Amino acid sequence: MPDAAPYNRAKSKLAAGELVLCMGLRQARTADIALIAAASGFDAVYVDLEHSPLSLETTSTLCLGALGAGVTPLVRVPGHDVHMATRVLDGGALGVIFPQVDTAVQARALVASCRFPPLGQRSVMGSGPAFGYRSLPLGEVNAALNANTLLIVMLETAEGIANAGAIAAVPGVDMLLIGANDLSTALGIPGEFRHPRMRDALAAAAAACKTHGKVLGIGGIRSNLELQTELYRMGGTFIIAGHDVSYLLSAARTDAKTLRAMAEKA
């Protein structure tokens, strides 16, 4: 591993069994959001290209800001577009999140697209943003990126949960990330995270991760510390705690409510 290898804070902490907190980005457009995330205690940010109008150019800017701030830049791509996935990786992301992965066949194809040989078939760019554009031997660059790139697949359907064990067994997959909102909706119980069907699904994903040595990630479950605590004890060490929009709305609503109450009492 070259001295200039990119530091993936999230992957390092996950390997040590530590909790990793990730902030979603949907409306931020400037690199300073990464510094704000770092100052707030987050380990990673993910740029949400599935549910935002952000461009690839802006995505790269956000990733570069995260690299500079020491937080791990991840990107959720809109679907299984492997060409977009490799472009965001070339643009500075240290991990890619693929939504709605339902089978091991899909997972293997995604791994192949995002890993360099001999682990996959990713096209080689050479040194780039993740290395600060340092001049390095190509073999070292490829090996460092293979080792420091997180590949995350989302389980968001009943089929994905049924195949959780097979998906977790795929070499090169680092994490099974539960998309709680989509999964509960697909199960016919939108938002009912304590419903028995949802709890069974979460348990199945956790068991698959434990069996195959993969990380369990949790997204979409907010403001329910009791449930988050249970999932953490089940192995859910990667938590998407919220996104920029929800944090802005929460703070703004609190201030507006406080000031209007003040006016009414004055």
Image (tube, rainbow, N blue to C red):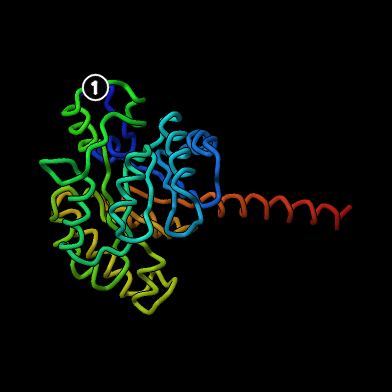
Name the one closer to the observer, 144 or 201: 144
- Report x, y in % for residue 139: 16, 29
- The extreme bottom residue here reads 188
- Give the farthest residue toward the right: 266
Residue identified by numbered label 1: 136
From what the image shows, is residue 120 above or below residue 104? above
Q: Quadrant of residue 93?
A: top left
The residue at 61%/53% (across/down) is: 250
Between 143 and 160, the one lying in front of the other is: 143
Query: As shown in the figure, which amino acid type bears the numbered disc 1?
Result: Leu
Residue at the spot 42% in from the left edge and 38% down from the top edge: 63
Q: Residue at x 43, y 54 (%)?
A: 49
Q: Residue at x 16, y 49 (%)?
A: 213
Q: Using the rendered image of the protein, determine whether residue 87 is visible from the camera's viewpoint.
A: yes
Q: Nearer the viewer, residue 41 or 45?
A: 45
Residue 83: horizontal and vertical position, in percent?
A: 30, 52
In the displayed structure, does residue 189 sit left or right of residue 39?
Answer: left
Residue 195 coordinates in the image, percent (x, y): 37, 74
**Number of numbered markers:** 1
**Residue 233 seen in the current view:** no
Q: Residues within 10 Å of mark 1 (few under 14, many from 20)?
A: some
Q: In the rendered image of this protein, does residue 149 appear above or below residue 226?
A: above
Q: Is residue 133 left or right of residue 45?
A: left
Residue at the left extreme, as displayed:
118
- Image quarter hosting the N terminus: top left
Q: Is residue 247 above or below residue 66?
A: below
Label 1: element kind: loop
Measured from the top left, where is residue 214 in percent x and y? 20, 50
